[in-house]
Amino acid sequence: MKKTFLFVLIAIIFYGCTKSDPPYVATPLPTEWDFNGLPYNGITTTFKGNILYTIDSLGESVTIKFYAPPATNGTYSVSNGYPTAPDYCEIILSGEIILNNPAPPFISTGYYSDKVIVTFLGDKISASFSSILLSNNIGSFPQNFAYISGTLIQQ
């Protein structure tokens, strides 16, 4: 009887004290970009119609405009103005701090090798790009050109 009681007591202690992991809760993947090497983190990223848009806590924003809403994973060429073909998009960077208002926004230049990779993560869209050449069209001085890289993920 003592052995049975001891066995039950050990079993209760062993099974009663096992640690269970909390349920897995998926955290949203972050939207991040860098502008001329300076990092930024989007706090809100939305996709509506043909526009993927993100903004950070300081008011800096990145907009990707597609010719039409992407429906599948794919690669899009970056245009130098509003995209005029289904496999093209435009990237616009705007905000107060980066641009030292009232400078106009930086817009993609359409450099031939600039691409955006679109991936669908369930019902959410992700767009990744690297070293996209932008210009704010104020003359041809080097300070009017910039590079942007990053990943925008719809939340």
Image (spheres, helix red, strand yellow):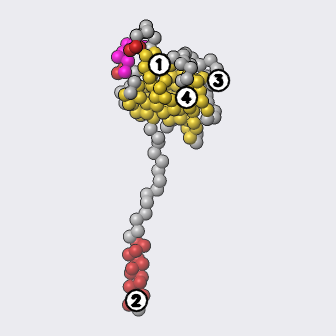
Q: Secondary structure at mark 4?
A: strand
Tag 2: amino acid: Lys
Q: Kindly identify which numbered label has been placed on residue 116.
A: 4
The CA span between labels 4 and 3 is: 13 Å
Q: Residue at x 38, y 27 (%)?
A: 37
Q: Secondary structure at mark 2?
A: helix
Closer to the chain start, of discs 3 and 1, is 3
Residue farthest along the bottom direction in this orientation: 1
Closer to the chain start, of discs 2 and 1, is 2
Q: Badge 3: how crowded within 10 Å, few (<14), some, or many (20+)?
A: few
Q: Which residues are magenta?
A: 98-104
Splitting the image into 4 quarters, where does residue 20 fall?
bottom left
Q: Badge 2: how crowded within 10 Å, few (<14), some, or many (20+)?
A: few
Q: Which residue is mark 3?
A: 86
Closer to the chain start, of discs 2 and 4, is 2
Tag 4: amino acid: Val
Labels 3, 1: front one: 1
Splitting the image into 4 quarters, where does residue 1 fall?
bottom left
Q: Badge 4: how crowded within 10 Å, few (<14), some, or many (20+)?
A: many
Q: Vertically, is 145 above or below 44? A: above
Q: Magenta span has 100?
A: yes
Q: Residue at x 40, y 10 (%)?
A: 141
Q: Kindly identify which numbered label has been placed on residue 134.
A: 1
Left or right: residue 40 compared with residue 107: left
Q: Nearer the viewer, residue 45 or 35?
A: 35
Tag 1: amino acid: Leu
Q: Residue at x 41, y 84 (%)?
A: 7
Q: Secondary structure at mark 1?
A: strand
The CA span between labels 4 and 1 is: 14 Å
